[in-house]
Amino acid sequence: MNKYMIKNTKIFALLCVLIFSSSAIAQLKSENYERNFKFGVGINTGLPLNEPYSLNMGGDVRIQYNVSETYSVCLTTGYNSLFVKNNAPNFGYIPVKVGYKTFLFSNSFYAMSEIGGAFSTSKAYKNNSMLFSPSVGYATKYIDISVRYEFLKDFPMIKDHVADTGLAQIMLRLAYGFDL
């Protein structure tokens, strides 16, 4: 297991502990809460932290089930395109993630963690990868803005001029959502 994977697993585990540790507060708030679904459509842009990538652009759709006033479970999919430096072919993938979202500070700010798979759509690279993605964001009734760290465990990168795997990136998501 490489050191990036160990570090990312520790970050993911810490985020999960923080999210699940506040469940007692949510139980007090959610006794008479009416559960519902929410649907969102977002655009994403990101900065890959590894060579040979320069930019990530994409879009997604998310269905969210609000379990309580402060907790939601989510299913997200979409399409992302990683732009490669030096005029090499771009690298596309379809992420499929399940997640858990906890709202903080009067239900506007949230922390979320997602895990899933990234399925390559590029002819040059046919492997798929596990995907880990913790995020923080701000949501109103219709608008959702978030920043996330995304780690694609098995996607190629270049480290110190040697091919390796484990692509990390910082992503920004702007979405419009509504109740179903």
Image (spheres, rainbow, N blue to C red):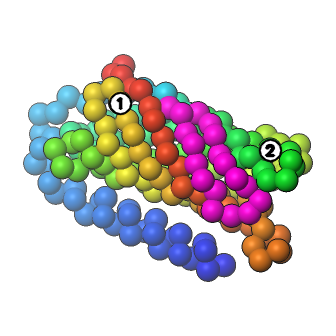
Tell me which amino acid carries mark 1.
Ile
Say whether residue 64 is visible: yes
Residue tagged 2: 90
Q: Quadrant of the C terminus?
A: top left
Q: Quadrant of the N terminus?
A: bottom right
> Does 29 sit left or right of 176 as displayed?
left
Q: Which residues are magenta?
A: 42-59
Q: Position of residue 120 (x, y in %)?
A: 76, 45
> Does 52 sit left or right of 179 as displayed?
right
- Sequence-wise first label, 1 or 2: 2
Residue 139's place in the image compared with 159, above or below, is: above
Residue 46's place in the image compared with 66, above or below, is: below
The residue at the point 64 percent across, 56 percent down is 48
Residue 143 is labelled as 1
Q: Position of residue 166 (x, y in %)?
A: 69, 65
Q: Position of residue 56 (x, y in %)?
A: 65, 46
Residue 74's place in the image compared with 155, above or below, is: above
Residue 43's place in the image compared with 136, above or below, is: above
Say whether residue 118 is visible: no
